Amino acid sequence: MQNNINLSAEAIKAIEALQHKNGTFDYYRETLSRLKTYVLHQGDEIGMSDTESIHTLRALDDVISDLAAIAGSTVGRDFDPESPADIAERVDRMFEDDDISDSNYPTELDEPREMIYDVTEAWKRINQTAEVISEAIRHASKAGEKYNSVAEELHDINGSLEPVIDQLDAIIAIDPDSYNPKEPTYMEKTALALERAADTLRAGEEILIDAIEYAKFAGIEPDDDFFTKAQSIDSSLEDSISDIKMLHKRVDLNQTHTIAEADSDK
């Protein structure tokens, strides 16, 4: 049975280019072959599962075979496309062979450096997020007074990202070749906990000051008991922060004495 197919002028030109002895088939074959090699070796790197890699390789092979069929007699004798079964078998052999060793594609990842890479990527994205939020703040500030609260919320969000960025900075600075962490002493843990407590109180004091300012704009009378209590709390926060500083100094002194005693025992 013979089937007649009506082709457009563009399709006819494409087929003629494929069938020409110096035509486009070799170019397409080489390009698709390079793509097959990329999927075969880099499939994991671009997030493809084993099954996705096999299906992609089969699809690429089908495309090459179809182009070869259209190109006809112009295809060189050295061209012998793999069948889907051949491709599947070759891929399976690659994944099953435990003795495969390729310096370009190591079977075992350098986990510490992979961790540093992942943290660096997270750092980049958080910084990009902070930049986008800063741009949103600028737009909100120009959008009118009714968006002032939105701008303030966005500003607080950006502020909360800063300590995260600092923590990621510290991790990125780790050198896997020389990293040898030691467990902090209880004295060092005490100092860190005191620092966090002081930071928390300072943040609370800043929020309380904002509340006092908002209350003034809200029309609460200056002699109202609200301000007396708020200022009393503010004063107690300042005293607490000062007390924590004193405690921190005592811890620092104890650490200095401990280090000195350890040195003298050597």
Image: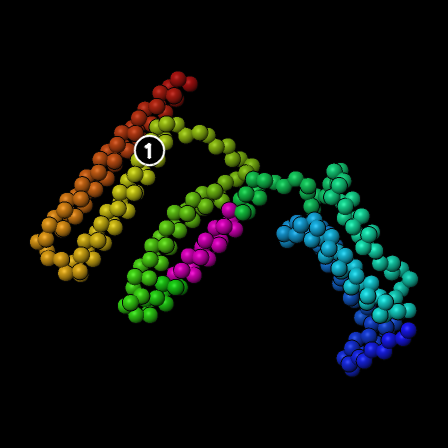
Instruction: From this view, report whether residue 186 is shown above or below residue 38.
Output: above
- Secondary structure beneath dot 1 equals helix
Indicate the position of residue 183 as horizontal and vertical percent values: 44, 29
**In which quadrant will I find the C terminus?**
top left
**Image label count:** 1
| Magenta-span inclusion, residue 104 | no
- Within-10-Å neighbours for mark 1: few <14, some 14–19, many 20+: many
- Does residue 120 belong to the magenta stretch? yes
Is residue 34 visible in the rendered image? The answer is no
Q: Can residue 174 be seen in this view?
A: yes
Q: Report the amino acid beneath label 1.
A: Ala
Q: Which of 246 and 199 is in front in this view?
A: 199
Badge 1 is on which residue? Answer: 191
Quadrant of the image occupied by residue 98: top right
Q: Give the range drawn in magenta.
A: 119-134
Residue 147 horizontal/vertical position (percent): 31, 66
Q: Against 224, is 184 above or below?
A: above
Residue in the foreground of this view, choosing between 42 and 91: 91
> What residue is at 81 percent from the left and 80 percent from the top?
6
- Determine the main secondary structure of the stretch shown in magenta: helix
Residue drawn at the location 18% of the way across and 56% of the way down = 215
Q: Which residue is drawn at 75% across and 56% down?
A: 57
The x, y position of residue 1, in whole percent, is 91, 73
The residue that appears at 41% across and 30% down in the rendered structure is 184
Q: Could you say which is closer to the camera, residue 163 or residue 39?
A: 39
Against 93, residue 189 (above or below) is: above
Q: From the viewer's perspective, is residue 114 above or below residue 151? A: above
Furthest residue toward front: 1
Residue 9: quarter of image: bottom right
Measured as percent of width and height from the top left, residue 202 is found at 26, 45
Lateral position of residue 55 relative to residue 227, left or right: right
